[in-house]
Image: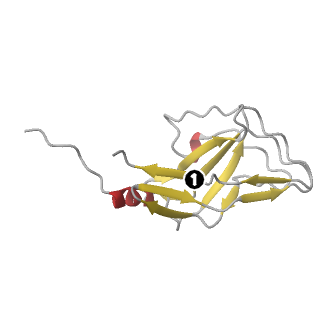
Amino acid sequence: MAAGPFIIPDKAVLNIALGLLNSANTFKLSYHTSAWAPNPATLEVFADVSSEIAAAGGYSSGGITLGNDALTISGSTVKFTGDAAELTAAGGSIPAWRYGVVRAIGTINGKVDPVVGYFLGDATPADVPATTVGNKLTFTPNAAGICTISKAA
């Protein structure tokens, strides 16, 4: 006799997410040029990511720490949220970029600096121009969260 479908309880979605998206972890956002060609089928850890923009204008190598990250659950959907991250260009421009990458810092489940996900800075896609001195580069998470995880019905 074949077994029926495997049912994942709603709270189990949260527990699965907690493995990576644990709010006790530190998360960083880094910016990357169009020279990087992301492959979602193989992208797993930050070592898989290349072409980070140069440290300049207030941007530091490795990216910006995201603050106040949290997980919330509504039904069977877990939402990962955090504050906006902002840099003001000083002493030079923050270089042009195309992709933003969010990752957890440290070793989690045997993976060093696992990637949570990435986004295009401009949906065209086109490079986001350099942020000139005195101007702000702001990452504002989507109202739906940095990412959501839900189970199929």
Q: Which color mode does the image show?
A: secondary structure
Image point 61% across, 43% down: which residue? 118
Q: For mark 1, what is the residue? A: 144
Disc 1 residue type (three-letter)? Ala
Q: Quadrant of the N terminus?
A: top left
How would you rate the neighbour count of disc 1 (Cα within 10 Å): few for under 14, some for 14-19, many for 20 or more? few
Left or right for 139, reference 148: right
Image point 46% across, 57% down: which residue? 78
Q: Quadrant of residue 65?
A: bottom right
Residue pushed farthest left? Answer: 1
Q: Quadrant of residue 120?
A: top right
Disc 1 element: loop
User: Where residue 143 appears, x then y in whole percent?
Assistant: 62, 54
Image point 90% across, 57% down: which residue? 90
Relative to the observer, which residue lies in front, 37 or 8?
8
User: Where residue 20 appears, x then y in whole percent?
Assistant: 47, 56
User: Where residue 137 appears, x then y in whole percent?
Assistant: 80, 52
Q: How many marks?
A: 1
Left or right for 125, reference 105: right
Q: Is residue 147 above or below residue 1?
A: below
User: Where residue 99 appears, x then y in whole percent?
Assistant: 68, 40
Relative to the observer, which residue lies in front, 75 or 79?
75
Relative to the observer, which residue lies in front, 57 or 107?
57
Image point 53% across, 36% down: which residue? 40
